[in-house]
Image (cartoon, grey):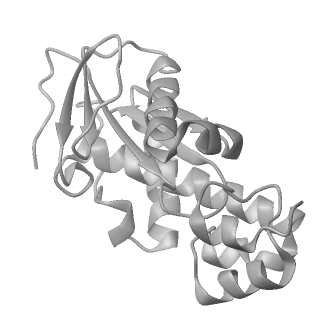
Amino acid sequence: MLTVQAVRLVAGVDEAGRGPLAGPVVAAAVILDPARPIAGLRDSKLLSAAARERLAIDIRAQALAWAIGEADVAEIDALNILQATMLAMQRAVARLGVAPGEAWVDGNRCPELACATRAIVKGDRDVAVISAASILAKTVRDALLIGLDREYPDYGFAQNKGYGTPDHLAALARHGPCPAHRRSFAPVAQSDFGF
């Protein structure tokens, strides 16, 4: 694992929800406190939902700063998913209560930020501060999709989190898209009944 030097503040940045057919893309930015390490940080995809929730509580309590940014379905459809993801990341970093000297971003692209940036492929797996951002982004987005499931119960969002599972695709074919769907995504556009 790469570690953050104490002499400068590094924000880890990651997103959740680039691939789903519905819901916002959510980004998180986290600055960990070297004096208060958090055990068990790793890629959110490698953790159980219960472990993610426990770690999210620890991150919020022990990090020097953390923030969430989103881009909604309308922004995703207007900008495209990559640009909407960059926008969500910019919003997350801008909302940090402490300005980082550098941002380490999961993946191979960085948003334009006021600080220096570094893209790290598999950063959510290898870099604790990015793992922390991954966990926050995932838990926040999952909670949003559970809320959308209550609003639009026909699509199974609480279970599929907006991903194109067979049941979700079957619901799209039956009901057409709801306002939470990304109409610029092909499976949604193909099932659009003209609403």
Residue found at x 63% / y 45%: 77
Corner quadrant of residue 119: top left
Residue 37 visible here: no
Q: Say above or below: 152 vs 17.
A: below
Left or right: residue 85 compared with residue 147 = left
Residue found at x 41% / y 14%: 98
Q: Position of residue 161 (x, y in %)?
A: 62, 69
Q: Say above or below: 97 vs 193.
A: above
Closer to us: 160 or 21: 21
Residue 115 visible here: yes
Q: Position of residue 67 (x, y in %)?
A: 51, 31
Residue found at x 53% / y 60%: 53
Residue found at x 25% / y 14%: 101
Closer to us: 156 or 56: 156
Left or right: residue 98 compared with residue 164 = left
Corner quadrant of residue 155: bottom right
Q: Say above or below: 16 vs 60.
A: below
Q: Position of residue 85 (x, y in %)?
A: 47, 40
Q: Position of residue 20 (x, y in %)?
A: 55, 64
